Image (cartoon, rainbow, N blue to C red):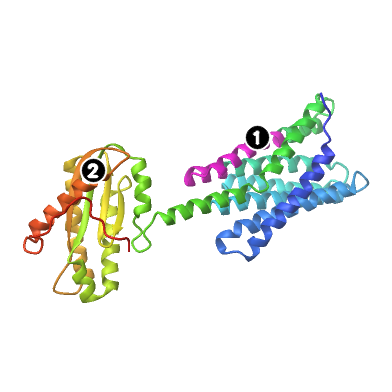
Amino acid sequence: MLALDIASLQVVGAFSNLLSGAIHLIPGVTGSERRKWALYWGSGKLLIGASNVLILAIGNGNTAFCERLLNIVMMIGLCLSLHSVAVFGERAVPRLLVAILAALMLGAVALTIGDAQEFRWTFVTLGLTRGLSYLGIMALAIGIARRERLRTGWIMAALFAAVAPIFLLRAGTLMVTLILPSWSIEGQLVEEWMIGVGLILLTLTHFSLLLMESERTQALLREQASRDSLTGARNRFALGRIEAGLQGPCALALIDIDHFKALNDGQGHATGDAVLRLLADLAQRELGERGMVIRLGGDEFACVLPGASQAAAQSVAARLSARFDRAVAATVDGPLYPSLSIGVVVGLVDRDLDRLMAEADRAMYAVKRARHPAHHSGRQPEGRRMAAAG
């Protein structure tokens, strides 16, 4: 089996920690409150890297006390790294893990002060702190990946899942030799390869949070591009993505606000905007998590209910219309109150809503003509009418 140059890997690991710390620390200090995770990650990496560099520099001379102090500094850096991932994911580190890490830290301090001869127990506490911190980071990364659907979160979790057992096993073997000196731990070369692989994997994790932040930002930008800025409902851009994922039975409700132009002209656009936001909010509440509200433009909205029956969709439309009538009275102060004309259709879709949209458009105008026959007597709803986005 080939020998592994652990010392060179330690040098590379130390300086990569310093580089990662410096790159994260600057935006962490100057950035917004939501980027405080970068401050903790950068500080932790700098402490780990500086400790490693100093340990390598002092060598194996009569400096055991200094080395123990540097191990404690490294443990602080590990805890800061763990805390940074918790801040990134807006979660707290589990209390049990916090208690264990605190006990290990106090134990390392007590060993440094009280035992001038045997310094290897400090390495045990450092190894346990490493392994447990990496397990905590792994668990937090899994939570972030699940909640935010970040693929980089799964990659980060996998890397730390591979690294944590290596350092825990290393701490365990060292503990056995300290408790039972007669035991001889064989396979030193295999152990060196484990540590080497662990150091290489750790090097790959130094910028994992930046990658997660980049993916999170891209997802946020896509979400913002898919939302109407006024009402928060989905927009036309999102409609294309929704269509691509639809299959099977689907209900579609097309909504138009009656007397909306008169409302804007008589009471101003601020009141009109308030009514649009009110409709979007009420519609999403009625549809629940499965349904989607899309603002097609102007005062026209579409509601998509995958898998809903005609009766269920009609019931949703009736409740929405009634709730809107009650709520708008508290929003609009005037002789003419806006109301809703809703056309509901149900049919099979295969990644294409055009046919249902045209049918819902005709159904909506049938409702509108029935409610306001004089105003719409000469108007024919040919095809799919959509107002310009605004």
As drawn, is 283 to the left or to the right of 94? left
SS at circle 1: helix
Where is residue 49 drawn, in percent x and y?
A: 77, 51
Please state, as top left, top right, bottom left or bottom right, where the N terminus lies in the image.
top right
Where is residue 135 drawn, in percent x and y?
A: 62, 40
Pointer 2 residue: 355
As drawn, is 140 to the left or to the right of 383? right
Instruction: Identify residue type, mark 2.
Output: Arg
Among numbered discs 2 and 1, the one appearing first in the sequence: 1
Name the mark nearer the viewer: 2 or 1: 2
Which residue sits at x=19%, y=44%? 345
Please tell me whether residue 103 is drawn above or below residue 224 in the rendered image.
Answer: above
Query: Is residue 325 visible to us here?
Result: yes
The residue carrying pointer 2 sits among few (fewer than 14), some (14 to 19) or many (20 or more) residues within 10 Å by Cα, namely some
Where is residue 282 drawn, in percent x and y?
A: 26, 57
Instruction: Identify residue type, mark 1.
Output: Ala
Which residue sits at x=43%, y=56%? 225
Please state, as top left, top right, bottom left or bottom right, where the C terminus lies in the image.
bottom left
State which region is magenta.
Answer: 140-168
- Image quadrant where residue 326 sits: bottom left
- Image quadrant where residue 196 sits: top right
Which residue sits at x=20%, y=71%? 263
Pointer 1 residue: 162
Please tell me whether residue 297 is drawn above or below residue 197 in the rendered image.
Answer: below
Please tell me whether residue 135 is drawn above or below residue 293 in the rendered image.
Answer: above
Residue 14, magenta (yes or no): no
Using the numbered discs, state the Cα–Cα distance from disc 2 to disc 1 in whole angstroms.
52 Å
As drawn, is 220 to the left or to the right of 267? right
Q: How many marks?
A: 2
The residue carrying pointer 1 sits among few (fewer than 14), some (14 to 19) or many (20 or more) residues within 10 Å by Cα, namely some
Prevailing SS of the magenta stretch? helix
